[in-house]
Image: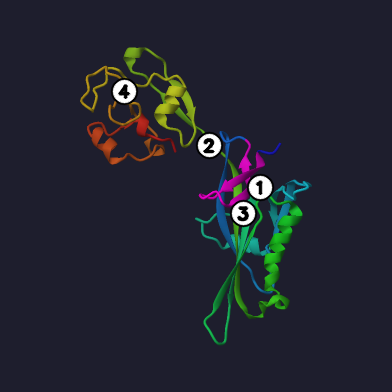
Amino acid sequence: GLSAKIVTRLNKAVDDRREATEILLVPKNNEDHFIDTFRVEIPIPLETPGLGIELLELEGGREDGLGIVIVNDLVPGGNAQRALEERSEAQETIMYGDSISAAELILRRSSSTTEDKTDVSFARTECLGYDSTVGALSDLLSTLSKENGGSNIEEATMILTLRRLRRRPQLEVKLYYPPSQELPPETIKLMPGDNLRMAMLQKGVKLNDPLAQRYDGKPTGSGNCGSGGLCRTCAVSVMRGGELLSPQKPNEKKMLEDTPRWRLACKSWVG
């Protein structure tokens, strides 16, 4: 089955005078998946004004014209494939399963009397059915024809905003308890964005050490600061994989300057 769904959200302006309906493609399960958004530029030669992208409708036929349409393939030798072959390694590619949420056509027009002019046309295609998506993209590209005033166009570029359903990676964390507790090591699974302290407590890990020397001057055994980053009772020694945690802020770094391998679990986020 599909891992994504269509939702309708009503946005109100601050003064409550205007309302706008927003149609979004979202994951069915936010714990396992997330939607990544990125943009791809495709130069459009004037002699072959097309994208060269095959689309596939996974869900459609609704009375409101909405649906889920994804990229099925790139046409060999088409403009999209050529653009991706020439892209830098840092730029995203177009993959099977991507959904086109918006398209922007940028035209640079020449003029014999004034400076060159740039025209920008925009179409939103998120959650449209197949026919509506193809129609919106075709309408944008139709401006390149001479019949529609395309005779003085010098350069054309299509910028596609794509949304990609990704599976959230899981990280395995192996925990070793102090020898005095006589507990065996255990492994827990965390998700990127998890706070280390909260995730460990939710999984039943006994984290805060009541006998730890506090940094805030309060007596030993007086509890913890509740994630304020003040007491140091949730400090953990990171033996390997410290680069997968969020960087230390200045206060935490100063608090643990005598033990550089240690981190405050309450101020450490995974990934």
Element assignment for label 1: loop
Residue 150 rendering spot, x and y as whole percentages: 67, 77
Give the number of the disc on residue 169: 2
Query: Of the residues under marks 1 and 2, which one precedes in the sequence?
Result: 1
| Residue type at tag 1 | Gly
**Mark 3 and mark 1: span between their CA atoms?**
9 Å
Q: Position of residue 94 (x, y in %)?
A: 61, 54
Alpha carbons under labels 1 and 2: distance apart: 18 Å
- Label 1 to label 4, Cα distance in Å? 47 Å
Disc 2 element: loop
Q: Amino acid at mark 3?
A: Ile
Q: Earlier in the sequence, mark 1 or mark 4?
A: 1
Image: 184 above or below 252: above
Q: Residue at x 59, y 56 (%)?
A: 161
Residue at image coords 45%, 20%: 186
User: Circle 3 sits on which residue?
Assistant: 94
Q: Is residue 167 magenta?
A: no
Where residue 151 sits, quadrant-wise, is bottom right
Rounded to the nearest angstrom, the CA distance separating label 4 from label 2 is: 31 Å
| Count of numbered circles in the view | 4
Q: Between marks 4 and 3, how big is the CA–CA gap?
A: 49 Å
Q: Position of residue 267 (x, y in %)?
A: 35, 34
Label 3 vs 2, first from the N-terminus:
3
Q: Which residue is mark 1?
A: 97
User: Which residues are drawn in magenta?
Assistant: 4-28
| Quadrant in which the C terminus appears | top left
Please tell me whether the stretch drawn in magenta is mainly helix, strand or loop. Answer: strand
Q: Amino acid at mark 2?
A: Pro
Q: Choose top left, top right, bottom left or bottom right for residue 223.
A: top left
Residue name at image x 68 percent, y 71 percent: 143
